[in-house]
Image: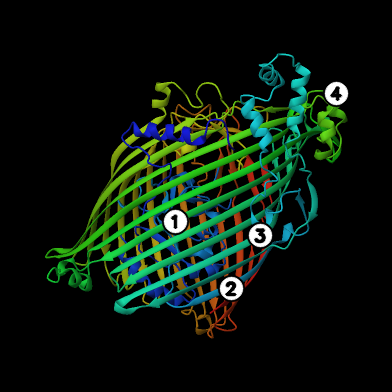
């Protein structure tokens, strides 16, 4: 969207405010980090593969869980989010947001190859992990205890998504897949879109027309007939209000009203993926290589859900039928150069597109129009949301080994043999575009017994039809370096590490909303038919119908935000007598953040506040130190060949995201709530304690037990706020305090000890039991319970896997069971009970057939138990939906 005052000018103002704190943006981009984490494979294709990584897990200085690409492929998960369900203490919300150890997505951090990247999600600063296909992965690392090389914004955990590097030799793969939700097979809801919908992008069909943009500029951000008349009468003054109304009606013709929702047969859901790479060995120990890949997939999904009022669930409810056509596209390219084992430079470029095209019909009854009165409402909604993420990274690794020292004349300095230096640069941008999101409201007559709609007509309102255009732009730039120097001392092995990071980020969120309708009750009651028929050109231009188009609201949902973060860290790692390991670390961060409400439709005066005090109050500045301590006791042959007992202590914080620091509001597409930001919210401080015991057996079996405790002051939480009738509203505030503590267990065990008939079977899994408590404090608006669990914290979670590998290596199979305990969905107010999402039992099955070394056939069934998702308030089911059972078949050829 383009207006008279350019977006760049407003962004520069936001950046300048940060400059007042000592940091000026040269460009409006953003942030990243690159800590290094040793890999631990949780499970591989064959159980014996675990032997290859036990040493790496033993050498890790923190509590970490890692899933490698082979494990993910075996289980059959297609996205990073679904794969993380297999990690101890990790649960998934809305199939995209990760909760670690009972703490919500804001308490976790996600990195890509160690660098922070922007989120294309409109409502959250965290990255929705369902946008990352597992096909680009090398591994996923979940780091649950803090160390100084990590960003200080840490509490629940850190997720580092690692992409594939260059291969060791030539490789080429092609994979074709079919996927179908059994409950979605058949008719779906759809509407007329554009010719490029199959590519996940709009061809201009839904775009805001140039005529409307020009009119918004020409008439000063308002399309009301009075404002139009004032503008057109600046000349001879002969124009009348009727002339202005005619101009208004003609402008309404430039809205895309061809959004009739109807049923159609769904198309085949499938995917295709291909990867090619090679490595070329040159003279003098050098090698260069590349990896190129691409993925395309599309699928239809139906979702039926119903939301009920706690007070009168049979009379006040909303029943929704929704269909979603999703397109996922990924392109990745990696290039690398190596010189012996001393030097390595790699580049990674990734493009991700994730588009959801939704159409829904909702029949609802409110306290003003309950079912028993035989009246209600029907809403026809469309939403085309295109999310793009582009990442370009370059990173290097350098070791001062013998060959390097010989080359630079440092042969005698053999104590530098293991000195390493790492560096990186990352540039990323995310773009989210929602053009022509529509919501058309009708009044309905219904049978009060069956709730069947017998008649409908347009709601008498000037905004009965709502047309919304939304743009989100995030730019992130970051760079940094690390060094590591191991030293052999008389008292033990000493390792010194240190590093530096700088990151900057800018965000712009822009929304323009139009309302179209008539206040004439008689016209509205006679407006019967489809949306396109009611809002036909002839009906709109007919002055007797009283149709009018208007810009809705004062554009209070748009905002600008930016941040900079400069940090440095150092650690001392001492191994004494091969028995005790002590790590001391500290991180310093200088953090600056600004969030400003922005009205791009204000053509007179300031589009952001002109008040200097208001502007300065919108800036948050903080610099502090964040310590970490880790002590490890190592004792071989203590019930197992290798045993370690780890203790960790750290102090970290959790910052509100950029949207939450402005008073702007937005609609959460997951909960349907209107969420209001809060310029006064401050970061939460966290004290972390961890204790973990690990046993590794010579045959590859392992067992881990962990205890954790977290004390959070001023936790950043959503609380319910006052809203009209059955509408839901929440606000972001600082609660007083909260605590989370729990136990994690993880195991891998072959069943050959039972008898030789069970040699091909194994069990793996993990279990978490936790408790959380939050004290609401003085800023919460009349909460029902002043003390409650933290939102999204399940009191238990269980993952269990039973696997089989045939002796000839041609067959493998796995049953995967997952369940999470009851968790708080939202907290009630003024006596209304808290809402809890009920336990959901999921059972998946995968089968692999390897007829040759080149061919793989994979078959997967997901959610075999076909349970419903339910949310209850005091045993009253207030929300339910049926995810359905999915079947998938993939065929892969590798060379």
| Nearest-to-viewer mark from 3 and 4 | 4
**Residue that label 4 marks:** 544
Q: Position of residue 754 (x, y in %)?
A: 49, 79
Tell me the CA gap for discs 1 and 2. Answer: 25 Å
Quick one: label 1 or label 4, which is nearer the N terminus?
Answer: 1
Quick one: label 2 or label 4, which is nearer the N terminus?
Answer: 2
Quick one: label 2 or label 3, which is nearer the N terminus?
Answer: 2
Q: Which coloring applies here?
A: rainbow
**Residue that label 1 marks:** 392
Q: Which mark is residue 418?
A: none
Between 798 and 453, the residue placed more toward the observer is 453
**Residue that label 2 marks:** 174
Residue 82 sits in which quadrant?
bottom right
| Nearest-to-viewer mark from 1 and 3 | 1
Tell me the CA gap for discs 3 and 4. Answer: 46 Å
Local SS, label 2:
strand
Tell me the CA gap for discs 2 and 3. Answer: 17 Å
Q: Is residue 278 left or right of residue 133?
A: left
Residues at marks 1 and 4 touching, judged by CB atoms closer than 8 Å: no
């Amino acid at each position: 969207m383009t207006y008279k005052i350019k977006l760049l000018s407003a962004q520069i103002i936001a950046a300048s405010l940060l400059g007042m704190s000592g940091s000026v943006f040269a460009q409006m981009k953003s942030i990243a980090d690159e800590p290094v984490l040793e890999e631990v494979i949780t499970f591989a294709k064959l159980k014996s593969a675990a032997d290859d990584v036990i040493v790496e897990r033993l050498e890790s200085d923190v509590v970490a869980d890692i899933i490698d690409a082979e494990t993910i492929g075996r289980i059959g998960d297609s996205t990073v989010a679904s794969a993380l369900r297999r990690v101890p203490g990790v649960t998934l919300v809305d199939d995209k947001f990760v909760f670690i150890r009972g703490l919500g997505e804001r308490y976790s951090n996600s990195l890509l190859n160690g660098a922070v990247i922007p989120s294309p999600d409109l409502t959250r600063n965290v990255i929705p992990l369902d946008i990352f296909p597992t096909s680009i992965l090398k591994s996923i690392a979940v780091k649950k205890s803090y160390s100084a090389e990590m960003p200080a914004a840490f509490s629940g955990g850190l997720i580092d998504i690692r992409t594939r590097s260059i291969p060791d030799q030539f490789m080429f793969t092609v994979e074709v897949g079919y996927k179908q939700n059994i409950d979605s097979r058949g008719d779906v809801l759809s509407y007329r879109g554009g010719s490029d919908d199959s590519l996940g992008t709009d061809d201009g069909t839904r775009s805001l027309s140039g005529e409307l943009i020009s009119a918004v500029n020409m008439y000063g951000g308002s399309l009301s007939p009075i404002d139009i008349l004032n503008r057109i009468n600046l000349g001879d003054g002969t124009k009348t209000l009727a002339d202005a109304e005619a101009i208004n009606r003609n402008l309404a013709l430039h809205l895309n009203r061809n959004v009739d929702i109807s049923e159609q047969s769904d198309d085949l859901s499938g995917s295709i993926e291909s990867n090619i790479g090679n490595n070329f060995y040159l003279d003098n120990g050098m090698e260069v290589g590349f990896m190129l890949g691409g993925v395309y997939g599309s699928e239809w999904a139906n979702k039926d859900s119903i939301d009920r009022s706690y007070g009168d669930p049979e009379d006040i409810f909303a029943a929704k039928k929704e269909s979603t056509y999703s397109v996922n596209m990924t392109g990745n390219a990696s290039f690398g150069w190596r010189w012996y084992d001393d030097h390595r430079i790699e580049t990674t470029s990734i493009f991700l597109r994730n588009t959801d095209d939704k159409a829904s019909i909702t029949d609802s009854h409110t306290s003003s129009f309950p079912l028993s009165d035989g009246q209600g409402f029907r809403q026809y909604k469309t939403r085309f949301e295109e999310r793009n993420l582009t990442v370009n990274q370059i990173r290097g690794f350098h070791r001062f080994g013998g060959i390097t020292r010989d080359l630079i004349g440092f042969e005698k300095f053999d104590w530098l043999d293991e000195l390493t230096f790492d560096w990186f640069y990352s540039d990323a941008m995310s773009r989210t575009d929602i053009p022509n999101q529509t919501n058309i409201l009708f009044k309905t007559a219904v049978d009060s017994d069956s709730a069947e709609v017998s008649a409908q007509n347009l709601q008498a309102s000037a905004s009965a039809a709502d047309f919304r255009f939304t743009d989100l732009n995030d730019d992130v730039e970051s760079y940094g370096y690390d060094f590591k120097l191991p030293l052999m001392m008389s008292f033990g092995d000493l390792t010194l590490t240190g590093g530096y990071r700088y990151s900057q980020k800018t965000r712009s969120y822009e929304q323009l909303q139009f309302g179209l309708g008539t206040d004439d009750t008689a016209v509205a009651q006679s407006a019967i038919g489809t949306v396109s028929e009611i809002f036909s050109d002839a009906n709109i231009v007919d002055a007797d119908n009283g149709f009018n188009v208007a810009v809705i609201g004062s554009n209070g949902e748009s905002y600008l935000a930016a941040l900079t973060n400069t940090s440095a860290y150092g650690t001392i790692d001492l191994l004494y007598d091969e028995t005790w390991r002590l790590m001391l670390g500290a991180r310093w961060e200088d953090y600056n953040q600004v969030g400003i409400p922005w009205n791009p439709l204000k053509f007179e005066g300031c589009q952001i506040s002109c008040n200097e005090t208001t502007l300065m109050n919108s800036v948050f500045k903080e610099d502090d130190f964040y310590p970490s301590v880790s002590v490890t006791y190592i004792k071989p042959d203590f019930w197992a060949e290798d045993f370690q007992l780890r203790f960790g202590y750290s102090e970290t914080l959790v910052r509100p995201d950029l949207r939450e620091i402005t008073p702007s509001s937005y609609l959460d597409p997951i909960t349907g709530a209107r969420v209001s930001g809060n310029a006064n919210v401050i970061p939460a401080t966290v004290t972390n304690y961890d204790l973990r015991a690990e046993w590794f057996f010579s045959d590859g079996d392992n067992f881990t037990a962990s205890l954790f405790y977290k004390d959070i002051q001023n936790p950043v939480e959503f609380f319910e706020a006052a809203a009209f009738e059955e509408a839901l509203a929440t606000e972001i505030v600082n609660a007083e305090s909260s605590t989370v503590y729990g136990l994690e267990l993880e195991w891998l065990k072959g069943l050959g000890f039972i008898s030789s008939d069970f040699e091909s079977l194994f069990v793996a899994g993990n279990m978490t039991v936790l408790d959380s408590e939050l004290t609401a404090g003085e800023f919460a608006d009349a909460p029902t319970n002043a003390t409650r669990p933290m939102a999204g914290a399940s009191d238990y979670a269980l993952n269990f896997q039973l696997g089989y590998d045939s002796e000839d290596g041609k067959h493998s199979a796995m049953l995967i069971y997952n369940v999470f305990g009851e968790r708080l969905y939202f907290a009630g107010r003024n006596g209304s009970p808290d809402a809890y999402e009920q336990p959901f039992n999921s059972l998946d099955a995968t089968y692999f057939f390897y007829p040759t070394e080149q061919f793989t056939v994979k078959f997967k069934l997901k959610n075999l138990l076909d349970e419903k998702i339910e949310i209850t308030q005091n045993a009253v089911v207030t929300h339910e939906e049926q995810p359905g059972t999915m079947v998938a078949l993939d065929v892969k050829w590798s060379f």
